[in-house]
Amino acid sequence: MYDLVPPSMKAQFNLINIPNQSIKLSVNLIKKKSTKKGLSDYTYNNQVIFKYSINLKNSIVLLTIYYENSNKNHFNRIVLGSFVYQTAMKFSVSTILVNSDSKSDLESLVFGFLQKDFIYSIYKNNSKKSKFKTNFKLSKNNLSLLNSINFLKELVSEPSNIIYPTSFVKRTIKQLDKKKLNIKTLNKEQIKKIGLDCLLAVSQGSNREPMVMEFSKKNQNKSKVDILFVGKGVCFDSGGISIKPSGGMEDMKWDMAGSAVTVSIIKYLSEIKTNFSYAGIVGLVENMPSGTAYKPGDIIKSYKGINVEVLNTDAEGRLVLADIITYGCEKYKPKIVIDFATLTGAIMVALGQHYAGLFCNDDKLADTLYQSGLDTNEKVWRMPLHDDFDKELNSPFVDLKNIGAGRYGGSVTAAQFLQRFVPKDTKWAHLDIAGTTWKNAGDIMNNKGSTGFGLTLIADFISKYFKN
Ligand SMILES: [Zn+2]
């Protein structure tokens, strides 16, 4: 005999390391509005998402949530789980029982709880990747999304002595289903043969060999793919000969986040049903100073044939992207290209850590990404593209310089540089994720460290843009 609530409407979380005290949190998730007095509002950005009450009885914390919201976007749904997690932490509970009158609301709560609970702290003694375990089985798609987010966080968190181009490739291949995907890896010799010389130039100061990875959906019977994802993968960015200041340089282990987002998108897409065709490409290098490093003043012929003058070796991400955008577009003939890159410090000056910079040559694509950003809380803000910025990249001596004229507008001139390599009639969005990728204190949906920024955005975007 079941009690009144069927088992599918219940979820339980247990602390993995059992403490001495045993405080329980009992959650009731009720799908209706309540006009009861004394309820608290849960607000985010001045919007009430739900109402709740908390009562303490012996060693049980009773949390009742009244959740009836007309705008049930992804974020509004999963934030329930983050709230339950934070309540559990506040009262140091060891067991959480959730009852719900809606299975889908419960699923969202569990998803949000697990996303918030994850932390990649494997190098800390006795530390687990999560504090709680649950008996609730997520749906296949949600499980794929969560696993892909966690894989993204893992890649971004690993230091550069663990994750460098060849080890990135190995770890990624293990995560992907070869029955669903064509996977191709290019080593240094193959990259040389093809002529991705800008990418090679960036890597030539490091002992770690560069790699390129390509992915495409299997059995897509189209000569043009609907969408190509491109990722910057600088596994460590010292700045090269134009070396960075030492303070905070450790952050440059995650200068490969664009690649991590790209491969996690590919992992996720390959595990769900998709009604569109897709491909992905990532360029993996290390940017190091050494006797063999590329130098300011060097002129390199890109794969597209444009001669690029390197005026700052720390503006290396655009060189890597230039070649793989050209090569990826030539090979997969995408209708849309979306690239991800921790490209500029300037984007953090402009937008802080709460919005990624979006540069886009197509209004519908930009508007959809903007709306998905709001709906997932992986927010993007459209920045300008204009010839006035593009002109700053001209030089009397070479086709293209790798930095703009002065100190200002650095994220825009970086985007303009990339645009020179995007085929004219291709829709293109560039996401500068330098500010949003890593947050020392975490954010509303994510624990400390890697935020997994970008994947949930794209998961929502494809459902809107392709009606997937
Ligand atoms: Zn750099």
Image (cartoon, helix red, strand yellow):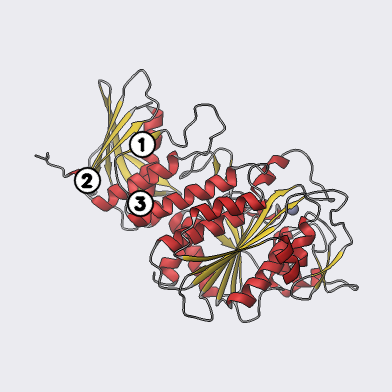
Mark 3: few/some/many CA within 10 Å (<14, 14-19, 20+): many
**What residue is shown with label 2?**
9
Q: Cα distance, mark 2 to mark 3? A: 16 Å
Tell me the SS state at disc 2.
Answer: helix
Indicate the secondary structure of the residue bearing disc 1: strand
**Residue 417 versus residue 115 in the image, above or below:** below
At a point 58% along the width and 49% down the height, the residue shown is: 437
Task: Decide if residue 451 is in sight here.
Answer: no
Placement of the N terminus among the 4 image quadrants: top left
Quick check: can you spot residue 374? yes
Secondary structure type for disc 3? helix
Q: Quadrant for residue 17, please give it.
A: top left
Q: Where is residue 86 in the image (x, y as percent from the top left)?
A: 40, 35
Q: Which amino acid does label 3 sit on?
A: Arg
Quickly name the residue at label 3.
77
Please give the name of the residue rendered at 59% of the width and 47% of the height, measured from the top-left corner: 156
Q: Which quarter of the figure is the C terminus placed in? A: bottom left
Which tag, 1 or 2, sits closer to the chain's start? Answer: 2
Q: Nearer the viewer, mark 1 or mark 2?
A: 1
First in sequence: mark 1 vs mark 3? 3
Image x and y of residue 127, in percent: 49, 30
- Find out whether the residues at labels 1 and 3 contact each other: C-beta distance under 8 Å: no
| Location of residue 407 in the rendering, given as x and y in whole percent from the top left corner | 80, 57
Q: Is residue 151 above or below residue 97?
A: below
Q: Which of marks 2 and 3 is in front?
A: 2
Residue located beneath label 1 in the image = 133
Quick check: 248 left or right of 122? right
Neighbourhood count class around disc 2 (C-alpha, 10 Å): few under 14, some 14–19, many 20 upward: some
